[in-house]
Image: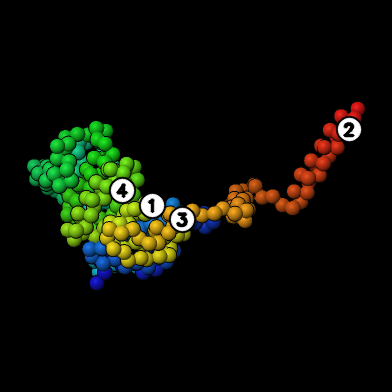
Amino acid sequence: MALIELDEVSKIFGFGDAATLALDEVGLSVNKGEFVAVMGPSGSGKTTLMNVIGLLDKPSHGNYNLSGQPVSRLKPNQQARFRRDRIGFVFQFYNLLPNLNVLDNVSLPLAYKGMTPVRRAKRASDILELVGMREREYFYPHQLSGGQAQRAAIARALINKPNIIIADEPTGNLDSHDSKVVMELLAEIHRQGNTILLVTHNPELTRYANRVIYMYDGTIVGDEQTAIGQMARHARRIFFRKPRTTDNDIAAGVSAMLKDVPGKEVTAATKRRKAKGKKRTLRRRATRSKR
């Protein structure tokens, strides 16, 4: 049985003419223990898909089963408990509370479970040791580097021992060294049996995954099995080829822009009027120069 199963899931934002189709009948099945990288251009629906899977958002249409349970049948408080206990989130901008130190940030999810402060602190300290941050547990977020802040965020994601980790661009704000440290942590979490869903634009990070999904315009357009340690073939082709820009490409881009920007339509009649105006101007200038 699949851990995550989506059947023709769609997500629509807005109403009427302002409606935007963020997910378009997406079908996806993820088994326990997979490390799935999700790639695609900005606006392709990657984050929306992760929000639906992570129970942060509801699909507009379709069916979503999580651990064999239809999510639509879960009450809001049941979904909240499922999200708290079974899913850990790692975000691009860390989302650490600035007025709490690292220890309190990491232990915060345990407070919602009613755990005593002493037990919360002990559990958080042990998790911080796993990610190499125990010596900074009393630091505040502004006193941390980007890599340290992300490691603290990973510790917070692990505090409830979830079996699914959703990481949305976790290395987007990090340099190459800190990116590697964070990805090695996620790889170790995966080796312990957890399911990892990673959103990324970086083809190098597909080396950590055993499956890569490609999205475009709200749909899944590719699904590639890959060996851990090797860059996905399709990701390599997409991101390392040098596309040639032709005159036709430029003309098509200009045409698309004119259609999408209100008030910028240029008709044939408008072009003729502008051409006639330029001719009149040139004739007037020639007459003045003769005088």
> Residue beneath label 4, please?
170
Asked if the residue under mark 2 is in contact with the one under mark 4, i.e. CB atoms within 8 Å, the reply is: no
Q: What distance separates the C-alpha of mark 2 from that of mark 1?
A: 60 Å
Asked if the residue under mark 4 is in contact with the one under mark 1, i.e. CB atoms within 8 Å, the reply is: no
SS assignment at label 1: loop
Q: What distance separates the C-alpha of mark 1 from that of mark 4?
A: 11 Å
> Residue beneath label 2, please?
287
Asked if the residue under mark 1 is in contact with the one under mark 2, i.e. CB atoms within 8 Å, the reply is: no
* Residue at 19% across, 54% down: 188
The answer to whether residue 258 is above or below residue 139 is below
Q: Which of label 4 and label 3 is nearer to you?
A: 3
Please name the amino acid that badge 4 sits on.
Pro
Task: Please identify the quarter of the rendering in which residue 143 is found.
Answer: top left
**Residue 112 image position (x, y, % from top left):** 18, 48
**Residue 249 image position (x, y, % from top left):** 59, 55
The circle drawn on residue 201 is 1
SS assignment at label 3: loop
Give the camera-side residue of 222 and 15. 222
Asked if the residue under mark 2 is in contact with the one under mark 3, i.e. CB atoms within 8 Å, the reply is: no
**Residue 190 image position (x, y, % from top left):** 21, 58
Quarter of the image with the C terminus in it: top right
Residue 245 visible here:
yes
Residue 259 visible here:
no
> Residue beneath label 3, please?
241
* Residue at 38% across, 62% down: 233
Ranked by sequence position, the earlier of labels 4 and 2 is 4
Disc 4 residue crowd, few under 14, some 14–19, many 20+, Cα 10 Å: many
- Numbered-mark total: 4
Please name the amino acid that badge 2 sits on.
Thr
